[in-house]
């Protein structure tokens, strides 16, 4: 770490700086500084350190007020009420003037480097304990895409700070034993890849279902990558056999599954995104060519070798330039930590044989009982008490420990839920 500034380019950080800029930004800095020479393309950007978050809390007495709100959880207050109260308190206090100036200055420098005024950026939260081997904070805080201009950027950064206290983030820290005020938040600002005009997706450097280490699994859908990461679409899936990557003559893609890809996320008005239907031609066509899949697999192997562990990456393709980029990378925290690769097969007996619904499972266990299709979006109505896992006296966003099972026709639900809720 070469800088003491509150705002600095990704290249000035590395994976040793997780405590300062969080796992997400530390990883972007690590790849920018050390893997560019190997051909791995990472969009440029900068990070706002966790020190800036600390200044926001300390400068307005927020820390003590947040502690008071958290204490209410243990007195029986509802999680959604406490979380909303904390977020409102954070948004009510202005960002320090000096910090605002530094963020705008870094954004203006980024614009000059890109040769255009007010470039669109992604503004992502990066918790200081994020993506450690024993934890997976992925998806707990908020991300804002297609942010343009200083005013929208500052507002998005402020919202990222508040998102450290989303209901799901509070519940996750409770279950994992993290001190709520011991976890800080850094903000990453990264030039947007115009994947709204092409496609994006995720990569695992092992099979996310079985843990088999000799394959790379690439998922791809049209538009911005949020639809794949959040499980909103059924993406294409490509399986690459790692040993074949060593032979330039062989085609390493050993399996292709074309997903339905019924929706895609594109740029909306006023710095937002919107979901639109894909065309019939898009639904029937592969998002990536085998050559592009090979490129992504080779990059992911380079990242895996550098980190020394299986990786979970996000990629995007620019529809204007045709270039591929890696936009996030984190250690895979589910299958890589399992001590056995045994696959269990389960069968329900003494039940009607008529199949009501089919799909790809979140996990490998089974259960019985009435089914529900929960709405997982923020602000949705909570599940009834008997459907909801309870921690202490509060209601979590999604009951992962006490639900018998969750099944959905889209594979991303499995990978996303596994990543976010530590289920195999």
Image (tube, grey):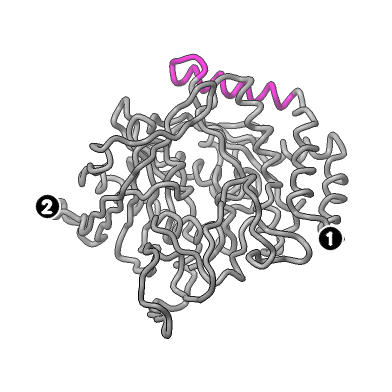
Q: Which label number is shown at residue 76?
A: 1
Please determine whether, in this image, residue 272 is positioned above or below residue 373: above
Query: What residue is pinned by disc 2?
Result: 249
Mark closest to the chain's N terminus, 1 or 2 = 1
Residue at the farthest bottom position: 350
Front residue (pair 132, 159): 159
Look at 45% across and 15% down and name the residue there: 116
Does 285 appear in magenta?
A: no
Residue 349, horizontal then vertical, whole percent: 41, 84
Measured as percent of width and height from the top left, residue 71 is found at 85, 56
Packing grade of label 2 (10 A; few <14, some 14-19, many >=20) is few
Residue 115 lies, with reference to residue 301, above or below; the image says above
Where residue 86 appears, as percent x and y from the top left, is: 78, 43
Judge depth for marks 1 and 2 and give the one in front.
1
Residue 93 falls in image quadrant: top right
Does the magenta-highlighted stretch encompass residue 113?
A: yes
The residue under the point 64% across, 41% down is: 186
Q: Is residue 285 left or right of residue 390?
A: left
Quadrant where the image shows the N terminus: top right
**Residue 268 place in picture, x, y as percent:** 48, 26
Which residue range is magenta in the image?
98-118
| SS assignment at label 1 | loop
- Is 299 or 385 nearer to us in this picture? 385
Specify the principal SS of the magenta part.
Answer: helix
At horizontal 61% and vertical 46% (from top left) the residue drawn is 378
Q: Mark 1, residues whose alpha carbon is within 10 Å: few (<14), some, or many (≥20)?
A: few
Tell me the CA gap for discs 1 and 2. 64 Å
Q: Secondary structure at mark 2?
A: loop
């Amino acid at each position: 770490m070469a800088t003491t500034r509150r705002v600095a380019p990704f290249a000035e950080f590395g994976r040793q700086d997780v405590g300062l800029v969080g796992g997400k930004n530390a990883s972007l800095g690590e790849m920018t500084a050390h893997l560019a020479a190997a051909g791995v393309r990472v969009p440029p950007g900068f990070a706002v350190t966790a020190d800036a978050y600390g200044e926001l809390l300390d400068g307005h007495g927020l820390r003590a007020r947040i502690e008071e709100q958290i204490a209410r959880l243990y007195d029986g207050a509802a999680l959604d009420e406490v979380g909303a109260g904390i977020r409102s308190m954070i948004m009510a206090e202005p960002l320090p003037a000096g910090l605002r100036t530094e963020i705008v200055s870094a954004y203006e420098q980024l614009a000059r480097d890109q040769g255009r005024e007010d470039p669109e950026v992604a503004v992502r939260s990066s918790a200081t304990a994020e993506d450690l081997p024993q934890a997976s904070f992925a998806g707990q805080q908020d991300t804002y895409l297609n942010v343009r201009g200083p005013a929208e950027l500052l507002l998005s950064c402020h919202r990222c700070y508040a998102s450290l206290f989303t209901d799901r983030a509070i519940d996750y820290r409770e279950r994992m034993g993290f001190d709520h005020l011991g976890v800080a938040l850094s903000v990453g600002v990264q030039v947007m890849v115009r994947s709204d005009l092409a496609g994006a997706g995720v990569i695992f450097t092992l099979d996310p279902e079985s843990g088999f280490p000799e394959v790379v699994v690439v998922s791809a859908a049209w538009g911005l990558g949020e639809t794949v990461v959040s499980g909103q679409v059924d993406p294409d899936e490509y399986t690459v056999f790692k040993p074949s990557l060593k032979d330039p003559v062989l085609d390493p893609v050993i399996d292709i599954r074309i997903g339905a890809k019924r929706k895609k996320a594109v740029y909306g008005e006023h710095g937002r995104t919107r979901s639109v239907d894909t065309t019939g031609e898009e639904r029937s066509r592969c998002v990536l060519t085998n050559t592009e899949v090979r490129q992504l697999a080779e990059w992911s192997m380079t990242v895996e070798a550098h980190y020394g562990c299986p990786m979970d990456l996000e990629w995007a393709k620019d529809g204007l330039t045709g270039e591929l980029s890696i936009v996030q990378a984190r250690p895979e925290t589910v299958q890589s930590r399992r001590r056995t690769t045994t696959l269990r097969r389960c069968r329900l007996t003494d039940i009607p044989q008529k199949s009501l619904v089919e799909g790809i499972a979140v996990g490998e266990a089974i259960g019985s009982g009435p089914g529900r299709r929960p709405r997982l979006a923020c602000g949705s109505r909570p599940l009834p008490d008997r459907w909801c896992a309870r921690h202490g006296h509060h209601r979590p966003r999604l009951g992962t420990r006490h639900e018998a099972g969750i099944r959905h026709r889209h594979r991303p639900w499995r990978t996303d839920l596994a990543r976010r809720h530590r289920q195999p």
